[in-house]
Image (cartoon, rainbow, N blue to C red):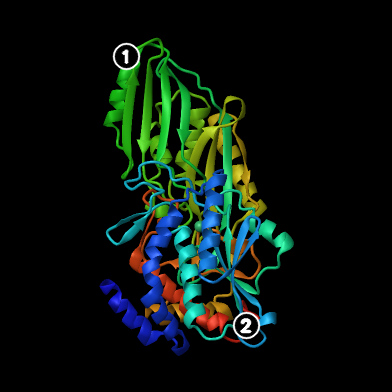
Amino acid sequence: MKRFLPLLVSAFLLAGAPARPVHVRYDRTLAPRMVPLLVQAIRFPTVAGNAKAWADQKAWLEHLAQGLGFTVRDAGKVLEVDLPASGPGAAEAPALGLLVHGDVQPPGDHWTAPPFEGTVRKGRVFGRGAADDKGPMVQALLAMKALKEAGPARTHTLRLLVGSDEESGSTDITDYLKTNPPPAFSLVLDSGFPVVVGEKSWNALTVEAAGSSSPTAERPWSVEALDAGLAPSIVPDHASVRLVSTAGKASLLALKARLEQKRIDPGCRLHLELALAGDAKALVVTVTGKAAHGGLNLEGGRNALVALARLLEGELPPGGPDDLLAFARLAGRDLTGTGLGLTEADPLWGRFAVNVAMVKPGKEGRLVLTINLRATPRLQGAALETALREVVARFAAERHTTLTAGGFFGDSVLAFDPEGALVRRLLGAYARATGTKAGPVISGGGTYAKRLPRAIAFGMWFPGKPYPGHDVDEQIPIADLHRGVHVLIEALVDLACGAPLKEPFQK
Ligand SMILES: [Zn+2]
């Protein structure tokens, strides 16, 4: 505990007076439970499709929350954990929602710590979900417990909502709202501090091509397989292509020698594997990079697909695979969409965030390239789709080929008044708990705030370091877990124990 002493002092000095006993209670009796609980949570591999892991985690959560003295209700895809209002008029008190999700992204490969163990190393907890979003789930439970034990009377019922498919279908909140009213207002603990007043829109452009290629005299090999990436929201950390010779092994050896001489994008690595035995003489070209969250930490990734596409420029025979890699080069020219003509910058929102994410097999032997675009209010929805379809059509015409554009453009940006009452209160809580004054931010990642009415993203990642969610070796500093609880306590004492806000999102 010694290492947290400076933090404790600052929390005491700066905290609002009614919050002080709550901070003290957390530090003295609840902080030691943080890491063990997070480790337990990480051990449920709650990736999409693992129903057993979800059921096990839900049973664990129910047991834990009841043990902490909360009321638990199974609301289908969402688990509700309530700390009821306590003062006079408690029966009619509004609910203040806290939203987290208990599911996680698939881990991918190349971890140095097992993704579902919860390894504690160098003052950090490693594991899938450590930051996104099981850390905040445990932080919320412990902040609520501290408030219950040492806080003032509550004018609001605190309602923690734990969703189950945020990372995949994202149907949980929509389903929940069919039979449950939303809280009066909610904080989504699944993004960054201090408070997120704008979330870019999530779009996916797909470009489909024939999977076949036509070997030529200069390039006597066919593309038998092309595969890259894991999911639209993750920077691809692997991309590979299998080339089968149609003219013996000499040409493949020459190609291999040529590729070995080429420069590869910084942070990426090239692996060449020759298979000369048997009839099919093949060369497998694999590039590895670094995975990262496509919306929150795009710069932290190293895109293996774009690197492979650049490496193979001029080396593939004509056909769909070559066309798709050429388009990947265009879209991946930078991370802001310059190659796609998305050059307009907004003063508050900045530019697009573009992740050339995947190439996967489509129907009937075709190949599909998927590009994830986080859009600003300047261009989104149908207008964005039209613009991108034109880019694809022009590109295909120039190459005398046929490409089919499609994708998803149904999301829109979420924007709040940066001067709104709730935003200002949250910024105040952040400043008191951390000693740092900061302004609101824009996020490239979408959260539940888009699905639940009157919800805004608040934490729990601290600014100034790359967000590790969706990344290999996802991790969170233990000091930040505690610091985040202190910020949340400060906000909850203010908002859940104060007079209800009439219009939280207006000035
Ligand atoms: Zn998340």
Q: Quadrant of the N terminus?
A: bottom left
Give the number of the disc on residue 194.
Answer: none
Q: Left of 104 or right of it: where is 174? A: right
Is residue 129 in view? no
Per the image, the residue denoted by label 2 is 501
Q: Is mark 2 within 8 Å of ligand 1?
A: no
Which quadrant of the figure has residue 274?
top left
- Residue 100 image point, x, y percent: 54, 62
Percent of width and height locating residue 314: 40, 28
Residue under label 1, please give it.
Answer: 250
> In the figure, is residue 87 to the left or right of 473?
right
Q: Residue at x 65, y 80 (%)?
A: 503
The reply, left or right, for residue 116 in relation to residue 91 is: left
Q: Residue at x 42, y 71 (%)?
A: 484
Q: Is residue 81 above or below residue 363?
A: below
Comes first in the chain, label 2 or label 1: 1
Is residue 391 depicted above or below 150 in this figure? above
Q: Amino acid at mark 1?
A: Ala
Most foreground residue, 122 or 363: 122
In this rendering, the answer to whether 478 lies above or below 381 is below
Where is residue 488 shown, x and y percent of the image? 47, 74
Residue neighbourhood size for the residue with mark 2, other residues' Cα within 10 Å, grouped as few (<14), some (14–19), many (≥20): some
Disc 2 residue type (three-letter): Leu
Q: Specify the farthest residue to the right.
A: 179
Q: Residue at x 30, y 33 (%)?
A: 262
User: Is label 2 in a helix, a strand or a loop?
Assistant: loop
Nearest the eye: 445 or 219: 445
Calculate the distance from the C-alpha at mark 2 to the C-alpha at mark 1: 75 Å
Looking at the figure, which quarter contains the C terminus? Answer: bottom right
| Closer to the eye: label 2 or 1 | 2
Residue 106 x/y as whole percent: 48, 45
Q: Nearer the viewer, residue 432 or 204?
A: 432
